[in-house]
Image (cartoon, rainbow, N blue to C red):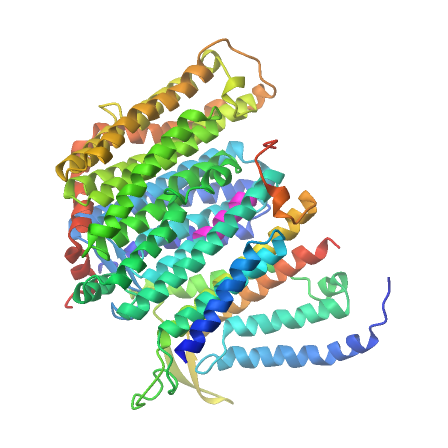
């Protein structure tokens, strides 16, 4: 059989076609669940094969519509994108099986699964595309789906937060278009590899720095870095747990990925201003996130502020720009996606049992739900990066990179943040799971065992991810290699250029 | 309240077909000249909205018992299917095929798979626009 | 021509900002519409304003307009059409549910219902 040239498009195409198919079965919830789960699981397998293919054969590219590389839209699957696609499919699968027992038939009949699939299309598309305008298009696809998921259910708080969320994103989309317009006027191309080549010829003039900062604003708004995270705690607070897991694990990370890509491929010729700015912002992001995580006594808020901390840590590694710190960032990015999804699903169960997210009203859960309690405990250790677990490896590399390039303050703050993150998450464990058991309303209706399947899968993956870091590390360093060395990416896309 | 909208209703009956025919023209003209599925779809949904204004939503939904959400999904299926069809021939996604065919009455005709894609766009636009109008209009 | 466009775009952005800073939800939505119009015109201007023939029809044309910005604008228009439509429906629903279109009264997180 001939080699399949369209392979890298499959993880994108499968959820797209599934999403369409599910619209037709809107009224039959059981069929919807089966189709959604099977296709998501199948997609995990495909994404895994894609990672192996990239590992063996190098970067995969596809010139969509047979237009040659710099002229048409090119999809590029390098190691970073393939790994993120794999992580995305895993999170999609677990969120789907978690939704069966928690999201409610009303939402399921109202196009919940199609919207979820289209969200995955947008996320995977954004990870895979090699064209800056196409990135905008996939951003819009995932945003459209996220609007639907956020407002689905139509409670007052959801309506209110969706309005704010849409407004913020419409403005940031307009800024994205403006930034692309400026970039196009300077380089005259949209292919990301080609932009990199052209910028190499042009050198970094003032206008490029302006464009770099514009892109930072656009992606920072999506990713939630300081001072652009203001919308995040409110909007992520509103939707139900599986949607929160998808948003927290995927949406902000798309912004982070976009910053990673543009700041390692485009704006590398004068890092003195742009990367310095990024570094200062990420350090403040970590500090602000930690303060939020410690200050709130609402379990959703604590996890949401932990997202902000993680974004700061990942992007600090990017701003340092050494091979070590980039590898650390990639490692930590994947670790964080998995563990944040797990944590959101776990606190979703806690909220389902107790009917509140206020930590002061919860206590003694471990007596009746030991499985939930210990899963949460392991997840907490993984998140904080206690040595054998996966958060540790990523942070060590980021800190090492920070020390190597003599960014002692930033590296120190990254280290200190681990401790405070552990404190914030242990606060949930100690207050929520220890103490005197209480009776909660509607407690008996919660199928805790069945709900636990999804977070247990995720926590297991992240434990294995940490334990098997020896096996996984070659993949990570291949991803970081492409980031540290843009010519690999450029040669793969433009071939004989 | 019953308003006297005889003039609107009578004109609509005639104008409706002109608009729909024109939208088809625009749709096919998009093959090589300005036009295409998006504009054609908007024109068609404009015609249906005119019908809704002249009569009322209930009457219109009796005349056109279409589930617009399914219509949009069908459109997506057309567009996605055309794009994915390239996979069967192992050429890059969205690669189109075209050629000239000598049809009995029409003579030498250019046929292009992009038209099927555009038909999908047409259906999506009509479906989505009408879904939106229905959502806002139904509550009154 | 570029100067005129710069002014047009500037005025559009200015009006958009003004409208988006108001408290009425409907004005905000109109503001976002104007903002995206401004952004679309900006792409057109950034691609270079030229008199010429249709892009890529007839290879001997001495001057033709750059087709890429036009394709980008078309895409961006379709997207902003979709988003604006969704936003309008949402604003309408929110108005019915919350009984107000004043963003001042949409503040805070009290009640957490």
Is residue A259 depicted above or below A424 in this figure? below
Find residue A152 and report its image quarter: top right
Residue appearing at x 58%, y 66% in the figure:
B126
Q: Which residues are magenta?
A: A142-153
Q: Is residue A151 magenta?
A: yes
Q: Quick check: A192 left or right of B18?
A: left
Q: Position of residue A9 (x, y in %)?
A: 32, 56
The N terminus of chain A is located in which quarter?
A: bottom left
The C terminus of chain A is located in which quarter?
A: bottom left
Magenta stretch, main secondary structure class: helix
The count of marks equals: 0
Is residue C52 depicted above or below A344 in this figure? below
Q: In the rendered image, is residue A418 in sight?
A: yes
Residue appearing at x 60%, y 46% in the figure:
A27
Q: Position of residue C99 (x, y in %)?
A: 70, 45
Q: Position of residue A303 (x, y in %)?
A: 42, 30
Is residue C88 depicted above or below A236 in this figure? below
Extreme residue toward the top, this view: A436
Residue appearing at x 49%, y 26% in the figure:
A298
Q: Quick check: A399 left or right of A13?
A: left
Q: In the rendered image, is residue C82 in sight?
A: no
**Residue nearest the viewer, comparing A186 with A53:** A186
Q: Is residue A221 magenta?
A: no
Q: Position of residue C109 (x, y in %)?
A: 57, 35
**Residue nearest the viewer, comparing A236 with A283:** A283
Q: Quick check: A371 left or right of A284?
A: right
């Amino acid at each position: 059989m001939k080699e399949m040239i369209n392979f890298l498009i499959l993880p994108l195409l499968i959820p797209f076609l599934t999403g369409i198919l599910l619209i037709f079965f809107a009224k039959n919830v059981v069929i919807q669940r089966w189709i959604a789960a099977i296709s998501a699981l199948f997609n995990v397998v495909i994404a895994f094969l894609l990672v192996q293919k990239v590992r063996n054969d190098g970067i995969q590219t596809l010139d969509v519509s047979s237009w040659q590389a710099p002229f048409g839209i090119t999809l590029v699957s390098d190691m970073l994108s393939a790994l993120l696609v794999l992580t995305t499919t895993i999170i999609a699968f677990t969120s789907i099986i978690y939704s069966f027992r928690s999201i409610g038939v009303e939402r399921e009949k109202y196009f919940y699964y199609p919207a979820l699939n289209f969200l995955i299309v947008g996320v995977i598309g954004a990870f895979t595309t090699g064209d800056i305008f196409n990135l905008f298009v996939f951003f819009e696809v995932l945003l459209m789906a996220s609007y639907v998921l956020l407002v689905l259910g139509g409670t007052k708080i959801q309506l209110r937060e969706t309005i704010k969320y849409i407004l913020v994103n419409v403005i940031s989309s307009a800024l994205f278009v403006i930034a692309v317009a400026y970039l196009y006027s300077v380089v005259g191309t949209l292919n990301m590899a080609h932009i990199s080549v052209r910028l190499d010829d042009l050198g970094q003039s003032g206008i490029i720095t302006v464009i770099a900062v514009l892109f930072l604003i656009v992606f920072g708004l999506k990713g939630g870095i300081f001072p652009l995270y203001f919308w995040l705690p409110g909007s992520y607070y509103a939707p139900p747990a599986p949607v929160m897991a998808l948003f927290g694990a995927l949406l902000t990370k798309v912004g982070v990925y976009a910053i990673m890509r543009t700041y390692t491929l485009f704006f590398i010729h004068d890092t003195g201003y742009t990367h310095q700015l990024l570094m200062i912002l990420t350090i403040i992001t970590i500090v602000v996130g930690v303060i939020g995580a410690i200050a709130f006594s609402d379990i959703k808020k604590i996890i949401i502020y932990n997202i902000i901390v993680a974004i700061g840590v990942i992007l600090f590694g990017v701003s340092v720009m050494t091979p070590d710190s980039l590898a650390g960032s990639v490692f930590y990015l994947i670790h964080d996606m998995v563990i944040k999804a797990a944590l959101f699903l776990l606190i979703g169960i806690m909220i389902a049992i107790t009917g509140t997210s206020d930590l002061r009203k919860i206590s003694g859960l471990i007596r009746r739900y030991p499985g939930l309690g210990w899963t949460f405990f392991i997840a907490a250790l993984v998140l904080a990066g206690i040595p054998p677990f996966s958060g540790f490896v990523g942070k060590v590399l980021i800190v090492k990179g920070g020390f190597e390039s003599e960014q002692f303050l930033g590296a120190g703050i990254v280290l200190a943040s681990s401790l405070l993150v552990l404190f914030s998450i242990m606060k949930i464990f100690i207050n929520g799971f220890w103490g005197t058991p209480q009776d909660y309303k509607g407690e008996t209706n919660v199928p805790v065992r069945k709900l636990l399947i999804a977070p247990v899968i995720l926590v297991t993956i992240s434990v294995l991810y940490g334990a098997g870091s020896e096996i996984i590390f070659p993949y990570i360093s291949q991803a970081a290699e492409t980031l540290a060395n843009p010519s690999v990416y450029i040669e793969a896309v433009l071939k004989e250029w | 309240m019953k308003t006297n909208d005889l003039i609107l209703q009578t004109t609509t009956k005639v104008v409706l077909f002109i608009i729909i025919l024109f939208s088809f023209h625009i749709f096919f003209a998009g093959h090589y000249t300005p036009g295409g599925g998006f504009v054609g779809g908007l024109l068609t949904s404009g015609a249906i909205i005119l019908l809704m204004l002249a009569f009322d939503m209930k009457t219109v939904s009796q005349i056109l018992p279409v589930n617009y959400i399914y219509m949009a999904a069908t459109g997506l299926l057309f567009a996605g299917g055309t794009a994915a069809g390239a996979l069967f021939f192992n050429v890059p996604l969205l690669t189109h095929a075209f050629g000239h065919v000598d049809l009995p009455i029409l003579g030498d005709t250019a046929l292009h798979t992009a038209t099927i894609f555009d038909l999908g766009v047409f259906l999506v636009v009509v479906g989505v626009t009408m879904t939106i109008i229905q959502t806002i209009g139904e509550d009154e | 021509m570029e100067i005129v466009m710069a002014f047009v775009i500037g005025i559009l952005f200015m009006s958009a900002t003004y409208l988006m800073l108001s408290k009425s939800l409907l004005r905000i939505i109109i503001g976002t519409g104007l903002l995206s119009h401004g952004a679309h015109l900006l792409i057109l201007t950034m691609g270079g304003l030229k008199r010429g023939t249709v892009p890529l029809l007839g290879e001997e044309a001495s001057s033709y307009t750059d087709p890429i910005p036009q394709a980008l604008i078309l895409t961006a228009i379709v997207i902003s059409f979709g988003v604006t439509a969704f936003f309008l429906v949402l604003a309408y629903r929110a108005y019915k549910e919350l009984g107000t279109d004043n963003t001042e009264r949409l503040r805070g997180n009290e009640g957490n219902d």
